[in-house]
Image: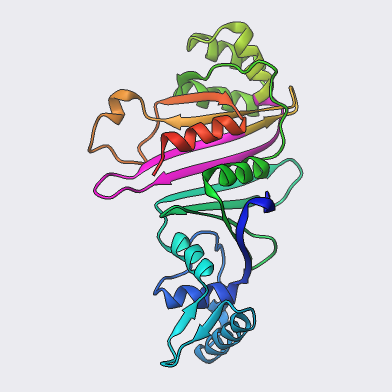
């Protein structure tokens, strides 16, 4: 990731993160898939917390005031505030051919602070406070993987979500002709459908993305996407699932309602940035 953009970076163990969240009155949340404390006794958990506090003090991340109240370093406080209560949350899981478990990337935005959260090892959490959304998007694009962008960018294209679902099902079966047919019936030119079919059939990696924005007194705004890398053209597509205008106009529609449209765009950093700007806090 772009370390030159980092304002602050820290790696926390599971015990340290849980201890710090306890100070906020918060439970472990995003990015924590398992809890090694489940098998521990209350006494063992207390010892783990005490050890975590000592390790944080040794790194000047934590100190205790005269009244024994814990005081956190300012940058660490910004990181944890974003983690506990983000205005905008980004989750990304990257699945590559021949890999086992997916790689994970998380982003948090709150009060002008942008935080990147990755997992460099088992039960380790790396948090990086960066300079703005540009650095966050740059890190996300790097996480998704390098892709050769076409010399002439294609304009984004919308197709019915049902057509894309059928196309992906046919792709899993290797049925390129059926992909072309279903996309063509959805209004896509045959030549364009053939290129998309080749990309869908030969994935090298894909990253599932979710962007959730919370605003005061407004329903949450959510976008679910797939960053699709292909061996066919050594390029990437960003597939964005969204509700159509009619559904979006219904104020009582659930934020996670089933999409009826899919936006297909190139997977460039500029496209990712435009998506974030659309959902700006």
Q: Residue furthest top?
A: 190
Front position in the image: 17 or 3: 3
Residue 69 found in image quarter: bottom left
Q: Residue at x 55, y 52 (%)?
A: 106
Q: Point out residue 152 in the picture as x, y percentages from the top left corner.
A: 66, 15
Q: Is residue 212 magenta?
A: yes
Q: Which residues are magenta?
A: 200-227
* Quarter of the rendering occupied by the C terminus: top left
Q: Point out residue 154 in the picture as x, y percentages from the top left corner.
A: 59, 16
Q: Main secondary structure of the magenta part?
A: strand
Front position in the image: 96 or 126: 126
Q: Is residue 123 visible?
A: yes
Q: Point out residue 103 in the picture as x, y percentages from the top left corner.
A: 66, 51
Q: Point out residue 192 in the picture as x, y percentages from the top left corner.
A: 61, 11
Taking 127 as reference, is 274 above or below it? above
Q: Residue at x 68, y 66 (%)?
A: 122
């Amino acid at each position: 990731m772009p370390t030159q953009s980092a304002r602050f970076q820290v790696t926390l163990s599971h015990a340290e993160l849980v201890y710090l969240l306890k100070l906020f009155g918060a439970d472990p949340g995003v990015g924590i898939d398992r809890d090694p404390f489940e098998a521990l006794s209350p006494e063992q958990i207390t010892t783990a917390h005490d050890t975590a506090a000592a390790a944080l003090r040794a790194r000047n991340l934590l100190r205790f005031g005269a009244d024994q109240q814990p005081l956190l370093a300012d940058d660490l406080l910004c990181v944890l505030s974003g983690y506990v209560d983000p205005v905008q949350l980004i989750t990304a899981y990257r699945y590559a051919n021949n890999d086992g478990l997916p790689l994970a990337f998380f982003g948090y935005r709150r009060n002008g602070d942008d935080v990147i959260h990755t997992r460099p090892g088992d039960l380790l959490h790396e948090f990086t406070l960066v300079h703005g959304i540009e650095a966050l998007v740059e890190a996300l694009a790097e996480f998704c993987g390098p892709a050769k962008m076409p010399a002439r960018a294609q304009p984004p294209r919308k197709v019915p979500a049902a057509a894309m679902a059928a196309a992906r099902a046919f792709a899993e079966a290797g049925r390129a002709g059926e992909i072309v047919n279903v996309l063509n019936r959805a209004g896509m030119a045959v030549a364009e459908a053939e290129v998309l079919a080749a990309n869908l059939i030969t994935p090298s990696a894909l990253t599932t993305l979710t962007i959730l924005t919370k605003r005061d007194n407004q329903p949450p705004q959510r976008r679910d996407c797939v960053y699709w890398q292909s061996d066919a053209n050594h390029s990437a597509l960003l597939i964005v699932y969204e509700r159509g205008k009619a559904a979006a106009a219904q104020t009582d529609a659930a934020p996670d309602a089933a999409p009826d449209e899919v936006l297909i765009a190139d997977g460039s950093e500029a496209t990712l940035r435009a998506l974030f700007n659309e959902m700006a806090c």
